[in-house]
């Protein structure tokens, strides 16, 4: 009997080694990796169901009636240093349709690199999404690329092009750039229609290459659905607000001065954030239960290092019910809570995120810093190293290890 068991165990071990070896054949791994990752995500969703992120224990609903704007002299000084005229109030054409770049379907979790690839192709770039993702998200299971990372790629790998992103955009902002020949990338939310545990809110990048006022639609290059997709102004407005109305413009570097004029006052970062702060406050005044407006308020306050007020705004957003994927894409609560000494709240929020999005290196980073401040040096190092396993190019995690005086 014992002999049979030994032979069975030996055979199982050999079979496991063979399967592991087969799995690591590049063609096999490419086909199976994302399916296993998706299956693991579904399993985690069944084990830990829920549509929203947990409200931190340290959170208290804060009645923020009116947030004071940024001190006006600072804004005025910033404008005096870098004067930029307002956009020429020339009436926009009723419709514009720029040439569509050669379309490519996004790989698993790759809408950011794929959308950037489409935008760069508009200007003659000959690469593809994988050239971008190899730098920004080497692990296909990494589900997010930040807009700052997209800008980084353009500025370091496509030097003949410039890239600028701002927040607080409007439909008129997007049309203004498109009308003079510059496609615009936006990040917006949408709802995954599914009967399974992956249903619900998620984020997605789109490249807008046209619009039509009569039909009230944008023409979008959608790396998931296809080229020249029609998206209504209403759908854009509703989805865009979850990402602070962020937009990214890419342009030839010799056109930089003309692009500054199109940005108008928003070319100044402080002015742009101040205006976005006022926009978020206005949305809250109209609807005090607007969860995304509260989050945007926190994000814009965080820009000005107003950590206490930002933390209160994030508390309100979480109390109202932020979609469970939200901290896969945006990390302001970690930063504001950390700077308020709310380290347990950072850890709990990161734990909730990583339970269902296990390759979120930003959550690993901030959980590591919170553990470090609580005296858990081993846990901090473990998190920083795990973040670098997901993304070996993640400089913030490398800095953290350097700060602690340890290697990868």
Image: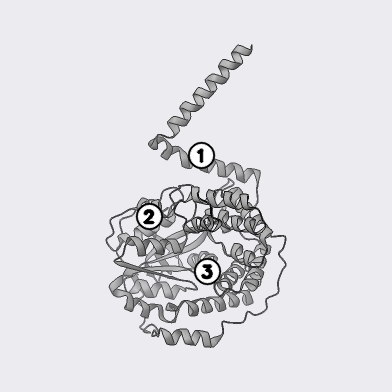
**Could you tell me which secondary element the residue under label 2 belongs to?**
helix
Decide which of tag 1 and tag 2 comes sooner along the chain. 1
Which residue shows up at 72% across the image and 67% down it? 60
Query: Dot 3 surroundings within 10 Å: few (below 14), some, or many (20 or more)?
Result: many
CA distance for labels 3 and 1: 33 Å
Say whether residue 242 is left or right of residue 157. right
**Could you tell me which secondary element the residue under label 1 belongs to?**
helix
CA distance for labels 1 and 2: 23 Å
Quick check: marks 3 and 1 in contact, CB under 8 Å?
no
Place residue 212 in its image quadrant. Answer: bottom left
**Could you tell me which secondary element the residue under label 3 belongs to?**
loop
The answer to whether one can see residue 53 in this image is no
Q: Which residue occupies the foreground of this view, 308 or 31? A: 308
Which residue shows up at 61% across the image and 46% down it? 45
- The residue carrying mark 1 is 36
Decide which of tag 3 and tag 1 comes sooner along the chain. 1
Q: Position of residue 3 (x, y in %)?
A: 60, 12
CA distance for labels 3 and 2: 24 Å
Q: Position of residue 107 (x, y in %)?
A: 41, 48
Say whether residue 302 is left or right of residue 17. right
The answer to whether one can see residue 185 in this image is yes
Q: Position of residue 221 (x, y in %)?
A: 38, 59
- 199 over 57 or under it: above or below: above
Query: Dot 2 surroundings within 10 Å: few (below 14), some, or many (20 or more)?
Result: many
Mark 1 against mark 2, which lies toward the viewer? 2
- The residue carrying mark 2 is 132
Decide which of tag 3 and tag 2 comes sooner along the chain. 2
């Amino acid at each position: 009997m014992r002999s049979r068991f030994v032979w069975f165990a030996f055979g199982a071990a050999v079979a496991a080694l063979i399967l592991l070896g087969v799995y690591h054949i590049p063609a096999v791994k490419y086909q199976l990796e994302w399916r296993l990752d998706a299956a693991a995500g579904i399993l985690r969703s069944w084990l830990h169901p829920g549509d929203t992120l947990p409200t931190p224990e340290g959170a208290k609903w804060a009645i923020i009636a009116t947030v004071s704007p940024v001190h006006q002299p600072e804004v005025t000084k910033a404008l005096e240093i870098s004067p930029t005229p307002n956009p020429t109030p020339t009436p926009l054409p009723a419709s514009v349709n720029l040439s569509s770049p050669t379309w490519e379907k996004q790989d698993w979790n790759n809408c950011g690199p794929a959308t950037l690839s489409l935008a760069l192709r508009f200007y003659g770039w000959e690469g593809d999404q994988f050239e971008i993702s190899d730098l920004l998200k080497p692990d296909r299971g990494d589900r997010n690329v930040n807009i700052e990372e997209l800008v980084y790629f353009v500025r370091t790998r496509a030097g003949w092009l410039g890239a600028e992103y701002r927040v607080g955009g409007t439909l008129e902002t997007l049309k203004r750039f498109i009308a003079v020949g510059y496609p615009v990338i936006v990040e917006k939310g949408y709802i995954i229609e599914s009967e399974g545990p992956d249903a619900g809110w998620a984020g997605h990048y789109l490249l807008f290459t046209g619009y039509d006022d009569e039909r009230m639609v944008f023409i979008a290059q959608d790396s998931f659905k296809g080229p020249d997709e029609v998206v209504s102004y209403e759908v854009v407005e509703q989805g865009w607000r979850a990402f602070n109305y962020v937009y990214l413009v890419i342009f030839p570097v010799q056109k930089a001065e003309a692009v500054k004029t199109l940005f108008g006052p928003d070319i100044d970062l402080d002015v742009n954030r101040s205006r976005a702060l006022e926009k978020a406050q206005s949305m809250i005044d109209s609807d005090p239960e607007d969860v995304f407006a509260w989050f945007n308020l926190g994000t814009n306050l965080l820009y000005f290092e107003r950590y206490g007020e930002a933390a209160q705004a994030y508390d309100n957003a979480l109390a109202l019910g932020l979609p469970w994927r939200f901290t896969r894409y945006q990390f302001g609560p970690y930063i504001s809570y950390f700077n308020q000494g709310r380290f347990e709240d950072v850890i709990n929020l990161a734990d909730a995120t990583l339970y269902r999005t296990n390759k979120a290196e930003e959550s690993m980073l901030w959980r590591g810093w919170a553990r470090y401040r609580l005296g858990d040096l081993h846990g901090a190092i473990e998190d920083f190293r795990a973040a670098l396993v997901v993304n070996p190019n993640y400089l913030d995690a490398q800095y953290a290890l350097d700060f602690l005086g340890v290697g990868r």
